[in-house]
Image (spheres, helix red, strand yellow):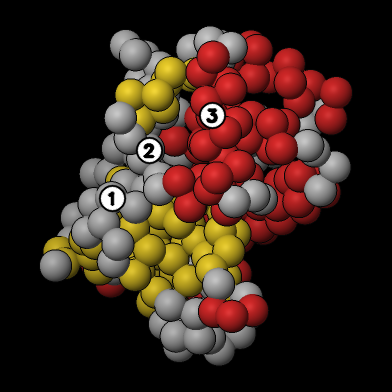
């Protein structure tokens, strides 16, 4: 399913195209972009697919994965509204990771030639994308380093806080605004589903969380934060903090 809508009329203030392209280039990108809709489980692009351009999440939730030994997928990162997708592939011929929708997801697509010209003619856009690259790499590196030092319960606490910072929680019941399978959550926490379930049960007994079917409510965020505070894991704030006005 596809369609188009204007960048100039877009209400996503965090979108780097909206923030850092001048009016002329916003109009040009609007005329030449595509809008795609993906349902839960649909691949947006796969590893080794040929690169044709850059995706920007308009709404929805996305999982970015990399395939390792025995064709086992590893979650590289998560993305939501206003996140670029496929940015790792702009300097190579094929995507090094894959991305697929966790629920209904709308994306804007800019082909390679058009986005290249936009970068060349909008230095603030180019710098903003460079800063996004840098921040994403830093967050992944820091997260991987500290996960290797954490025990099982700390990893699960970190995973829950990571989901909160990416997708947020419902203010009414504090449930995470995303539903992942137990396998996906275990992958994020660097463990197995059985270990994850034991820790979640322990967290619930300690009134740190409440399991509501497939949803998880974070009932004591301060308690979860205290569990990993000594690791100085400050990588989730200011996801879109660019040194530009």
Q: Mark 3 points at which residue?
A: 200
- Separation (CA) of disc 2 from disc 3: 16 Å
Query: Whole-percent x and y of residue 220?
Result: 55, 11
Quadrant of the frame with the N terminus: bottom left
Disc 1 vs disc 3: Cβ atoms closer than 8 Å? no
Residue under the image location 52 percent in, 25 percent down: 201
The mark lying in front, picked from 1 and 3, is: 3
Q: How many marks?
A: 3
Residue under the image location 55 percent in, 45 percent down: 194
Secondary element at image label 1? loop
Query: Whole-percent x and y of residue 209?
Result: 50, 18
Pointer 1 or 2: first along the chain: 1
Q: In this view, does 87 lie above or below 58?
A: below
- Separation (CA) of disc 1 from disc 3: 23 Å
- Separation (CA) of disc 1 from disc 2: 9 Å
Query: Whole-percent x and y of residue 21?
Result: 46, 53
């Amino acid at each position: 399913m596809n369609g188009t809508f204007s960048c100039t009329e877009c209400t996503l203030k965090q979108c780097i195209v909206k923030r850092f392209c001048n009016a002329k280039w916003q109009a040009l990108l609007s005329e030449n972009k595509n809008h795609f809709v993906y349902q839960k489980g649909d691949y947006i692009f796969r590893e080794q697919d040929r690169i044709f351009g850059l995706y920007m999440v308009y709404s929805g939730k996305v999982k970015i994965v990399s395939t390792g030994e025995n064709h086992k997928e590893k979650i590289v990162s998560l993305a939501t509204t206003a996140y670029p997708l496929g940015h790792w592939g702009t300097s190579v011929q094929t995507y090094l990771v894959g991305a697929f929708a966790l629920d209904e997801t709308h994306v804007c697509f800019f082909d390679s030639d058009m986005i290249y010209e936009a970068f060349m003619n909008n230095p603030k856009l180019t710098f903003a994308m460079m800063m996004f690259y840098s921040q994403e790499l830093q967050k992944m590196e820091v997260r991987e380093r500290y996960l290797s030092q954490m025990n099982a319960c700390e990893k699960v606490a970190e995973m829950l806080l990571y989901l909160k910072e990416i997708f947020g929680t419902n203010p009414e019941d504090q449930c995470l605004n995303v539903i992942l399978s137990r396998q996906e959550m275990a992958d994020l926490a660097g463990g197995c589903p059985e270990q994850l379930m034991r820790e979640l049960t322990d967290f619930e007994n300690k009134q740190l969380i409440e399991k509501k079917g497939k949803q998880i409510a974070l009932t004591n965020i301060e308690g979860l934060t205290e569990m990993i505070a000594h690791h100085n894991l400050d990588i989730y704030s200011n996801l879109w903090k660019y040194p530009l006005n």
